Image: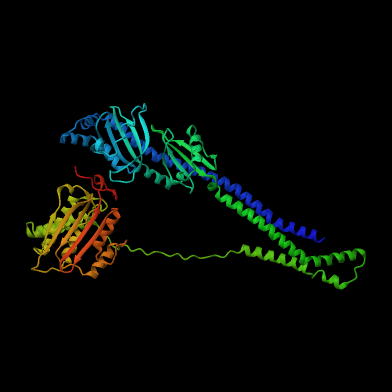
Amino acid sequence: MKKQFFRLKFIMFISLTLIPICIFGFISVFFINMKVKQEAEAKTMAITDLMEQSFSELTNTLEFYRVTMNSDAQLHLALIQALNNEHLDMEMIQRLEQSMQNIYYSQSTKPYIQSLYITMQDSPYYINGLNRERFSDSIDKNWAGIMDGREESAYIQIRHIKKNKFDTHTIPTVTVYQRMKYNELMAVNINQDYFNKWLNSVADYDGQVLMILSPDGQVLFFNKNAGLLPEDIKSQALAYTAGTQPDNLLLNGYYISSETFPGNYGFRYVSMIPRSEVFELSNKILQLTIGAGLLSIFASSVLAYFFTRRDYQQIFQIIELFDQAEKGEFHSQNELKTVPNSPYFHIINNVIHLFMSQTYLNVQLDAKKYALSTAQLSALQYQLNPHFLFNTLQSIDLEILKACSKPTPANQMILELSSLLRYSLDAPMKPVTVQEEIAVTKNYIGLQSFKYRDYFHVTWEYSQDILDFPILRLLLQPIIENSIIHSGKAAPEKLWIKIKIRRNNGFLSFYIIDNGYGIDKKRLADLQQALTEEQVDSSGKHIGLKNISQRIRLAYKNGYVRLQSKKGMGTIVELGGIGYFANGAAGIYPSAKLPPSI
């Protein structure tokens, strides 16, 4: 009787806990499996499209080089002269540079193109960029014979080359060889690390393996997970995808997808996603379901034992009363009175009451309020309309001419001020040449000369070959203004300012030197600290120098502003790490250097 009651209690509790848990768990796993599989297929398609776009760009670049080489007769003639003559005159060099300009510009603007070589059969020379190099003097000299004996017009090889002969390490490079129409051989060296890092960034799963293969099955580019993949699994996957293009094939615990990109070079990608990562969420839910099921069995056993032990006596008494009544021996009024008030009936009433209370409480939801913190942004409270300002200055200029009947220094000052304002307000994000920056700085110096007369003198030192390089505008004027205003000089003392522009390690550096009274150590330390801050202080103190420092650091990867000064001896401001803007375009290339002069 007691065992039967325990079994009934256990079945009751297990029905209330285990069955709903199992139903919920398995239904959740089923629908989540469908969802994550669809999501994995969508991510695979997205990565495929992304890789196809990226490698279409690479294919188009290689095709551009091939078509240019095959269609440009002038380039062919220039290459014949450069590769077959031991001595090149200036006319040959210029013809080569002009003919190679399109290819060189394309190469320099593609971050994944490491270098491009062109040679002819039996030539002791080859073209590297715009320069001719001799095989015997080159550290990378064994590539020219790769295509000997090969019938195909294009071939892809993985090589490890050095940048210079002093390097102790090599750079992994994917070289694409192409035979040209006029018997030239072109080798395009592609930076393998560039695409390897890119594949790391586009992977959607932590353990996803991404590989780009050549037509003959070489693994050209791969992410970090490909190096962790066992060789036997990798070999099976590559062998299986060599002749087919499977879509989410399950092999060795990986969902494998493969597709060949369009183009003449036959690049093919392979994606391997671990099944455990695809179904990670559903596996966790399944584990939780099993754990909850085991816990429910244990809890049901404990509860059944507890309630059986607690209620068995009362139920036994009720059964005895029923038995007595059935036998006609029911005669105890007290026992009959205790039946409605027994703990068993109180428990039932309490359970009903608790269920009703919990149902009511579950319907009630507490609203929570979240305080939103707002960031206060400082903004300029007024703006000056440039057109209104220029029109006003022109009106003043005309009124002065009317009053004086001839040009005066005031007219000249207004003209130079208008030019300076137009320069500062016209397209502030568009770079200017060094020559334009020098001209507007001289304009500002001339404007200040009307006020200070012979109080200061400015000298310049620079070479003509830097005048056409594009830079940020208004780099020099605020510093010249600081030198004039804060020099501490007074008549009859004369302020000398020297501006030097130099090329240092492929970058431009500007030096503004004055013989003012200098800056004390504490203030100099504060200024140097302020130059490293990320935001420009809006208080107005040294805002020009801080503004220049922040603009240079944002625009150029290696840009910096240095300040040197000694009390009583003067101040030196150095603007360094100024890079090169290709063709004066509005975009900034932070890591680019100035090209070497030819």
Regarding residue 391, the answer to whether it shows in the image is: no
- Frontmost residue, 216 versus 2: 216
Residue 299 vs residue 490: left or right?
Answer: right
Q: Is residue 271 above or below residue 18?
A: above
What colour scheme governs how the chains and residues are painted in the rendered image of this protein? rainbow
Point 21% across, 45% down: residue = 596
- Which quadrant of the rendered structure holds the N terminus? bottom right
Q: Position of residue 598 (x, y in %)?
A: 19, 42
Tally of numbered discs: 0
Q: Is residue 258 above or below residue 349?
A: above
Q: Position of residue 404 (x, y in %)?
A: 7, 59
**Residue 556 vs residue 409, the one in the foreground:** 556
Position of residue 475 measured from the top left corner of the image (x, y, whole percent): 22, 56
Give the residue furthest to the bottom.
Answer: 334
The answer to which quarter of the image holds residue 144 is top left
Q: Position of residue 534 (x, y in %)?
A: 32, 61
Quadrant in which residue 414 is drawn: bottom left
Q: Is residue 499 visible?
A: yes
Q: Is residue 151 left or right of residue 37?
A: left
